Image: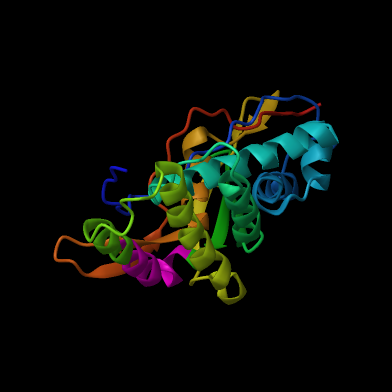
Amino acid sequence: MKTTPKKLAAILLVLLTVCAMTGCSLFGNGKKTYETYVKSLLDVNYKAEFTDYMKITGATQEEAQKVYDDGITYLAEALMTAYGINDIEGSTIKSQFVDLAKNIYSHASYEITDVSKADGTYQVTVTIYPIDILVITYDDVVAYIEDMNQRVTAGEYNDYELDAYETEYAQGIIDILNDALPNIGNQEGTTVTVTILDNDEYYYISDADFLALDKAILATTLVNEDGTTGSTEASDGLTDTETESISEE
């Protein structure tokens, strides 16, 4: 078997696609309406809480579930990419990362801390407390990867089939993350302010604003040029999304 050294890559969080829907049970507009709208977007993505999202958008239970499931799948795949993990046909690697993603996002913590209006435009400020699991496991993951690479160099895996090696490597990462789940915490709050775009028929937030919210949900470890590390919010995501437009019927 020929193997290549594993390395820890930057985590690219991919924003989920939110299909445009119309219909709104919150008639008119105003601070409470926009506060509920922004929180519902966060709730449906990270908490699997659908009630307000369904009321505001007119989405069905199945449609709201798909929004959540898509986000979970994207996080699972982003983690696998970051750790250099390949899905092996017939294995449980992907499903284990999906379960991890659900557990991680269940610790999402945020609150609406301000809704203001200036020059006819509303802005909603969200305080987000980034989830720290990737920070608290960083040293263990790096040590594990370094150990695996040394064992590869020493020839310990020469008699392994590639799938067996990839599965063993992936399970080690999964075990580190699972072991850390009871110790998950949240970092100090960081504020993100989003603008409500309102054309008198629909209101919504921009893709860029939702990306800013998403980036703050999960903290990662930043490796500096001098080799030192520090904590930062999640790295830039790649997105091709449209955020929800709400009809003001």
Q: How many marks?
A: 0
Question: Which quadrant of the view contains residue 90?
Answer: top right
Question: Which quadrant of the view contains residue 181?
Answer: bottom right
In the picture, measured across the screen, residue 2 lies left or right of residue 21, that is: left
The secondary structure making up most of the magenta span is helix
Residue lying furthest left? 226
Q: Nearer the viewer, residue 44 or 36?
A: 44
In the picture, measured across the screen, residue 189 lies left or right of residue 245, that is: left
**Residue at the (47%, 44%) spot, across then down:** 78
Q: Nearer the viewer, residue 96 or 249?
A: 96
Q: Position of residue 41 (x, y in %)?
A: 67, 44
Q: Nearer the viewer, residue 61 or 125?
A: 61
Q: Position of residue 35 (x, y in %)?
A: 69, 50
Residue 10 visible in the current orientation? yes
Residue 12 visible in the current orientation? no
Whether 185 is drawn above or below 63: the answer is below
Residue lying furthest front? 159
Residue 131 covered by magenta stretch: no
Whether 8 is drawn above or below 44: the answer is below
Q: Position of residue 70 (x, y in %)?
A: 63, 37
Q: Position of residue 160 (x, y in %)?
A: 39, 49
Residue 137 covered by magenta stretch: yes
**Residue at the (15%, 60%) spot, across then down:** 225
**Residue at the (30%, 51%) spot, across then down:** 158
Question: Quadrant where the N terminus lies?
Answer: top left
**Residue at the (56%, 55%) spot, across then down:** 125
In the picture, measured across the screen, residue 40 lies left or right of residue 216, that is: right
Question: Quadrant where the C terminus lies?
Answer: top right
Whether 164 is drawn above or below 190: the answer is above
Q: State which region is magenta.
A: 134-145
Coloring scheme used: rainbow
